[in-house]
């Protein structure tokens, strides 16, 4: 006697277990990554100072009080200083202080 009524029910449960396992591993990796970021922020390394020179759209939104949508509209203008790394936009804090 099996736990499930048919092979299709067993396959669906297998896929569900695999999905839950993948989500759990993702949560563990995220926690490790956040811990590394927090511990890197406490130490004074050269790479930490480089990352502090760039700010993301969400970070700029929190710093300025503007909405992310407004910042995206500003980024569309050609004279706005921006840097695209992968699919994300970053802004240099030095150039933002000049503006």
Image (cartoon, rainbow, N blue to C red):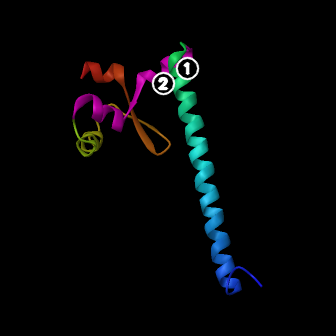
Q: Is residue 37 magenta-colored?
A: no
Q: Quadrant of the C terminus?
A: top left
Rendered location of residue 37, percent (x, y) = 53, 28
In this orientation, does residue 80 appear? no
Image vertical order of residue 26 relative to residue 38, above or below: below
Mark 1 vs mark 2, CA separation in Å? 6 Å
- Residue at image x 56%, y 30%? 35
In this orientation, does residue 51 appear? yes
Image vertical order of residue 91 relative to residue 53, above or below: below
Hey, which residue is sitting farthest top in the picture?
Answer: 44
Q: Quadrant of the N terminus?
A: bottom right
- Residue at image x 56%, y 46%? 27
Tag 2: Cα neighbours inside 10 Å, few (<14), some, or many (≥20)?
Answer: few
Position of 36 with respect to 93 (left or right) is right
Image vertical order of residue 91 relative to residue 45, above or below: below
Nearest the viewer among 67 and 86 is: 67
User: Magenta residues?
Assistant: 45-65
Nearest the viewer among 46 and 96 is: 46
Rendered location of residue 97, percent (x, y) = 28, 19
Using the rendered view, name the quadrant where residue 9 is placed: bottom right
Q: Are marks 1 and 2 in contact (CB under 8 Å)?
A: yes
- Residue at image x 24%, y 30%? 64
Nearest the viewer among 66 and 5 is: 5
Tag 1: Cα neighbours inside 10 Å, few (<14), some, or many (≥20)?
Answer: few
Rendered location of residue 92, percent (x, y) = 38, 25
Q: Secondary structure at mark 1?
A: helix
Which residue matches tag 1?
47
Q: Main secondary structure of the magenta part?
A: helix
Hey, which residue is sitting farthest right in the picture?
Answer: 1
Residue 51 bears which disc, if any?
2
- Residue at image x 53%, y 12%? 44
């Amino acid at each position: 006697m099996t736990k499930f009524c048919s092979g299709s029910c067993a396959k669906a449960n297998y896929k569900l277990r695999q999905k839950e396992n993948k989500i759990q591993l993702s949560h563990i990796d995220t926690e490790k990554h956040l811990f590394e970021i927090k511990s890197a922020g406490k130490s004074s390394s050269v790479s930490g100072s480089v990352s502090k020179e760039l700010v993301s759209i969400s970070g700029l939104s929190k710093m300025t009080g503007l909405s992310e949508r407004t910042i995206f509209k500003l980024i569309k203008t050609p004279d706005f200083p921006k840097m695209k790394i992968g699919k994300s936009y970053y802004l240099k804090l030095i150039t933002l202080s000049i503006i």
